[in-house]
Amino acid sequence: MERRGARRVLTGLRGHEIIEIGAPEWERLRTYIQADLIGVVVAAVWIAALWVGVRREGWLLVIVALLLTMAAFLLRAIHLIHSYRRFAAVVVFALSNWIVAVAVTSVVPFALATLTLAVLLPVLVAVQHMNHERLSAMLGATMLVGTVLVVVGSLTPGVGLERLVPKSVADALAIVFIPFITILVSLAAWQNHGMLVARAEALRESRARLVAAADRERCQIERNLHEGAQQRLAAAAEQARQARCLLDDDPGQAGPLLSRLSDDLQEASAELRGLAHGIYPPQLGQYGLETALRAAAQHAPIPTQVHATGVGRYPPEIEINIYFCLLEALRNAVKHAGERATAVITLLDRNGLSFDFRDTGAGCHPDVVHTGTGMINMNDRLGAIGGTLHIDTRPGGGLRLHGHLPRSALESAGVERSRQERGGALRDALHAVWHLIARLYTSLQRSTHPHPHQYIVTGLWAIMGVALGAGAVATAAFTGVHKLWLLALAAGCVTVILLVMAALRVVKRHRIDHAIGLSAGITWGYALTLTALIPAALPYATLVCVSPVLLSVAFLPRRRFKVVMACTVAAAVAVTLAGRLAPGAGFENAPGWLVATVVIALVVLGLTRASYLAWHNHVLLVARAEALQESRARLVAAADRERRQIERNLHDGAQQRLVAAAVQSRVAQRLMESDPAQAVPVLGQLSRDLSEAQAELRDLAHGIYPPQLAESGLEAALRAAAQHAPIPTEVRATDLGRYPPEIEINIYFCLLEALQNASKHAGEQAAVTIDLRERDGLCFDFADTGIGCHPALIRTGHGITNMYDRLGAIGGSLTIETSPGAGLRLNGHIPASAYRDAG
């Protein structure tokens, strides 16, 4: 992204581009804070112009100073974003809004209507960037600050500035800035709406990439085994056979041949050991992340330093993912950074586990990073365990990677908190405040997870409650003082009640988008009517205006959501005009304590509903992505378990046989000089060991990635697997052709997993039938005649879960039918669109 002019000054700060592959949440946060910064600067300039051209009052300069202080806070927040401290940036953004809002309102109480929405802004921004615990604490703080703000604005006299400033100027400020802040609220809701869709889509794409990366890795390991160790073993077996023949024909030539054989076996053993270490380094499991990285740095082609602070041991899924991310970064630096480049790796455990990777290489344009498979795989790996990856690069400026695994992700993986974070007691207190408010609010809805219609009904009931209360008070007052404005207020309340009653009958019978539209229309009409009758209710009316757009975040498609956004801004303009220009019905003539009490109660009510809708959006944002996130994490964990199993099989099988064969070749070589007859059985054993090692490697390679799958397709690979299955297996195929590799390999391993499960659990007398066919896509049926099991039990197994994840990653589905004594049947379907998209 190119930046020009003032925007570069505001967003660059360092001249680097921050990149978050897949979901640029940091960029969105920065853009939002920039918009707020522009509004603050414009307000400061406006008030400074007022001081210069209208009235030179010192309090105007105080307000300008407060706004400039807020601007400094916002610049600090932008700097924190560049320092990869998103949570701290949101907190600074919130503090700047809250402090300035309360301070300005204490000086100028008539600014309450303008600044009520400003208190709500930070929590709407935080929805995307905080976990449940932190967001609930911020919601508690929002309620407390909002209450303080409305109490200060309603009860304090201020400095009398409203008497000094012409009413037209105050009206103009309100008419400009209330819609502006409403636009910021709508923009935050729009970002939350977009994130609901984008995050789920990004997770689906990431899950598919993880499966594809694991399958490419399988294929690469199989190729390395076939072209490396297997070829060396074949040559060694041939040398052993030749040495055995030379014992009878030309014993003098057998000695040098055995010497070459010993050297070849040592090289093959070293090659196999290197391959096994590359699959899963033993230092990682034995000593942890820091030691494994130091070992990798020692063997790196470029000078590499590793620094670690506070780093201990972590669960295997944490260590292996961070290790391979940094190993991938080191390999990229070796390839692209240049011959004279150096690299520094820094690990830090503070409020989570972080790492920095820096090289002094040539760097690149930020756009190039987005296309790199290595960087995308690193982002997917970290994302699968709850972390984030950010990249800072430019041509000639080297490359910096910053990865962060938050404390919450470490704790969910079983890492205990080593020390209490600063501010923990305050956060717990604010969390308790919000928990109490949320519990009271959900008690009105009679459910902690209500249907969206229930939110609408609750909002309409709240409007009816306010109208009933106001109507009753107005009617009672009218009987005593007989003022017409009280009668008009009571009539307006009756009209609102009738409309709400009609709406309640309609809402539950209509689709959610129609229900939201009807509710929004009534809500905006209510806010406009209330403000026209009671201008002092403008702070509450602004909160009422934004409720529909907050409710729409999770339930409307993008086009209709844009309509709601536009109508929200239009409603805010109309409500502001009514609140500032309409004469009202005379409620301001009521006792001051009554006006203040009503305004405070209404604002707290409106703030509670808006905050709860923000919380609801956060819950949905997390919940909709949670299943995909768990699936992605399971795929990464399964791939890492497979890595460890392959490394263990190589170490305990072929590697041990190669070591034994190398020893036997040296023994045979010594016996050739002293007692050639004794060398014969040793060479025989050597040949057998080499043959067994060949067979083990071949079976291992075929299990990792069967060559028939790439050469002949899915049907041939499954028939080969059926021939070697421990139980009778029949494969049927109808109209089956060739499919993209990612389709074939995922179906193959799903069915292989099912076949292995049947061999373990179906019983000795069981038989298996696999049926493949092309019908509106690629379908398969797997059925065994085994003992079956309870349906609830089978969903807890790793095998079935992996099958779900694999098929889901390529756009397919899996259904299971089983019961005790009735065997097991699996049905999988991959729609044609999935493999057409895959090529």
Image (spheres, rainbow, N blue to C red):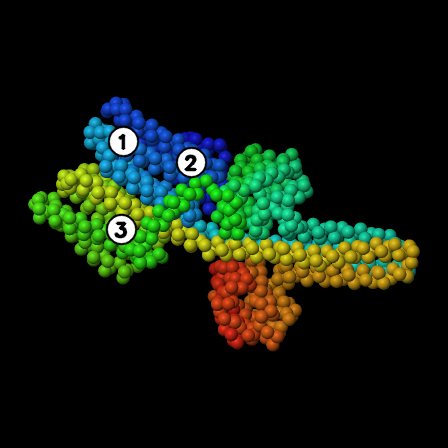
Q: Earlier in the sequence, mark 1 or mark 3?
A: 1
Which residue is depicted at the point 58% across and 62% down? 749
Q: Position of residue 260 (x, y in %)?
A: 82, 52
**Pointer 2 with pointer 3, Cβ within 8 A:** no
Q: Nearer the viewer, residue 431 or 529?
A: 431
Is 4 rendered above or below residue 251? above
Q: Position of residue 505 (x, y in %)?
A: 23, 60
Q: Position of residue 211 (x, y in %)?
A: 55, 55
Q: Which residue is mark 1?
A: 107
Is 554 rendered above or below residue 60? below
Q: Which residue is mark 2?
A: 77
Which residue is depicted at the point 15% across and 51% down? 472
Q: Using a 10 Å C-alpha cutoff, classify the residue at mark 1 as few (fewer than 14 neighbours), some (14 to 19) or many (20 or more).
A: many
Q: Earlier in the sequence, mark 2 or mark 1?
A: 2
Q: Using a 10 Å C-alpha cutoff, classify the residue at mark 3 as few (fewer than 14 neighbours), some (14 to 19) or many (20 or more).
A: many
Which residue is depicted at the point 74% across and 57% down? 656
In three-dimensional space, the C-alpha distance between marks 1 and 3, rounded to whole angstroms, equals 34 Å
The amino acid type, in three-letter code, at marker 3 is Ala
Q: Which quarter of the picture shows residue 295?
A: top right
Q: Earlier in the sequence, mark 2 or mark 3?
A: 2
Q: Closer to the observer: label 2 or label 3?
A: 2
Q: Position of residue 87 (x, y in %)?
A: 44, 41
Is 585 rendered above or below residue 716? above
Is 459 rendered above or below residue 400? below
Q: Which residue is mark 3?
A: 520
Q: Closer to the observer: label 1 or label 3?
A: 1
Task: Provide the secondary structure element on which disc 2 rests.
Answer: helix
Q: Note whether residue 596 is visible.
A: yes
Q: Note whether residue 552 is visible.
A: no
In three-dimensional space, the C-alpha distance between marks 2 and 1, rounded to whole angstroms, equals 26 Å
Left/right placement of residue 340 relative to residue 145 reads right
Task: Provide the secondary structure element on which disc 1 rests.
Answer: helix
